[in-house]
Image: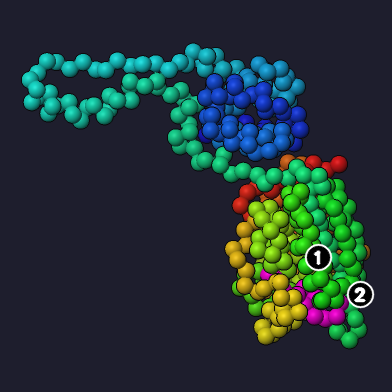
Amino acid sequence: MMEERHKKILQSNRSNLVRDLDPSKLYDGLLEKGVFTQDMIDEIQSSGTRRDQARQLVRDLETRGSRAFPLFLQCLTETGQHSVAEILQIGAPSAHLQPVAPIQAVRPAVQPLPLSPPMDADKQSKYTVPVYPLQKPSTTPSPSPVESIKQVRVRRDSIQSYKMDASPCGHCLIINNVEFEPECELSNRNGSNIDCDKLERRFKALNFTVEVKTNLKQRQIKHALSALSKKDHSECDCCVVIMLSHGTEVSHNRFPGAVYGVDGQHVPVQQITNYLNGQHCPSLQGKPKLFFIQACGGGERDTGFEVSPDEAPPSIRGEDDQTDAIPMSSSSDSLSMSDEPDARATLPTPSDILVSYSTFPGYVSWRDTQSGSWYVETLDRILEENAPTDDLVTMLMMVNNEVSQNSAKGLYKQMPGSFNFLRKLLYFQSQT
């Protein structure tokens, strides 16, 4: 395995490597030195743009054993990428000295077959039959130490990334429900406009065409989703839907929860996702469809549990924190879709769909009236800081961790989560 210090050097410099590395110059050297096989290089080359290839190369390099790092440094020097090599050598000044010299001397060698004394045919057969399988490998070149690593390596090079280089990358629909009709007895969602503005700026920076719709009734939400599904997404690589509203828990067979229109009527999350699945939106088949739900999953409040003193202390949020919770609705109306026959409750396999929830199903989601919701505030910052280097699922794990440290009124907790049916890694475009 690669030394831990070398892994840390690669990980801490991943952003610089993705930005500056020219993978195309390295392939011949890495292949010749046995760091990668031809199949692995072919898959790296097919991963997408130069940045995608650099990201995949660095990720695979960490799995290639103790000699991979010094050989990588040697290839960087040989191809004139001295600035990149110098950055890595700051943390490992001697990493390239000891392993490099012996590698040049390692050559495939043909070992002679062992000689056996003369004997009659019967004895020859009796004593040598079990020996032949052991001698057989000696007729082929012996693999170098680096090449032999592939026999025990857990293969990750077959995991590829979604194509995400279209311009614009795709459509992003934000539905922001703030002011609810008095007769539906739902409070206004103060602070939601802050969430909306943050996410609009963020996804524009990620090269999405963003459309914001405010204070929609249930029927209007369905109409907006239906219109989105009927767009031609053939030139796009992705589609994003963001729901900012009150929410509740409903019966479901795949994606839990529902979001409310300003008229007090809800739309189940699984119906929302259904508008963009492969059946109802053919131009998005095989492309990632992302749903971010800032709404409560139910009315239960999480008081958390005690942790050991060495755990990070929770962040105490403001006294004005509000929830987006509505009591659980009956199952009889949770799947009602008579007004939208093109969206059915029974989903086909939801490939290439990810639904990210601000809170665990059944629990409330907290929102600060001055700074916006915990979930959106954290998601926006994580995307800003980590989108150039990390994939979406990794970033959502960061969001989960940070939001879980918060504490409303010094008592209540929140745990985001996601239902992930993506088939590949998803990296957003570099922010401009």
Tell me the quarter of the picture where residue 210 sits: bottom right
* Residue 143 visible in this rendered orientation of the protein: yes
Disc 1: CA contacts within 10 A as few (<14), some (14-19) or many (>=20): few
Tell me the quarter of the picture where residue 179 sits: bottom right
Q: Secondary structure at mark 1?
A: helix
Asked whether, in this view, residue 299 is left or right of residue 45, the answer is: right
Give the total number of marks visible in the rendering: 2
Disc 2: CA contacts within 10 A as few (<14), some (14-19) or many (>=20): some
Look at the picture and state if 298 lies above or below 423.
below
User: Residue 122's spot in the image, x, y percent?
Assistant: 8, 26
User: Residue 202's spot in the image, x, y percent?
Assistant: 85, 51
Q: Quadrant of the C terminus?
A: top right
Asked if the magenta segment contains residue 263, the reply would be yes
Asked if the magenta segment contains residue 12, the reply would be no
Please name the residue shown 62% across and 58% down the image.
351
- The mark found on residue 179 in the picture is 2
Report, in whole angstroms, how far the alpha carbon at label 1 lies from the one at label 2: 23 Å
User: Residue 200's spot in the image, x, y percent?
Assistant: 87, 56
Look at the picture and state if 55 lies above or below 365.
above
Q: Bounds of the magenta span?
A: 259-271
Look at the picture and state if 322 lies above or below 399.
below
Q: Are marks 1 and 2 in contact (CB under 8 Å)?
A: no
Badge 1 is on which residue?
A: 227
Asked whether, in this view, residue 171 is left or right of residue 150, the answer is: right
Q: Nearer the viewer, residue 312 or 359?
A: 359
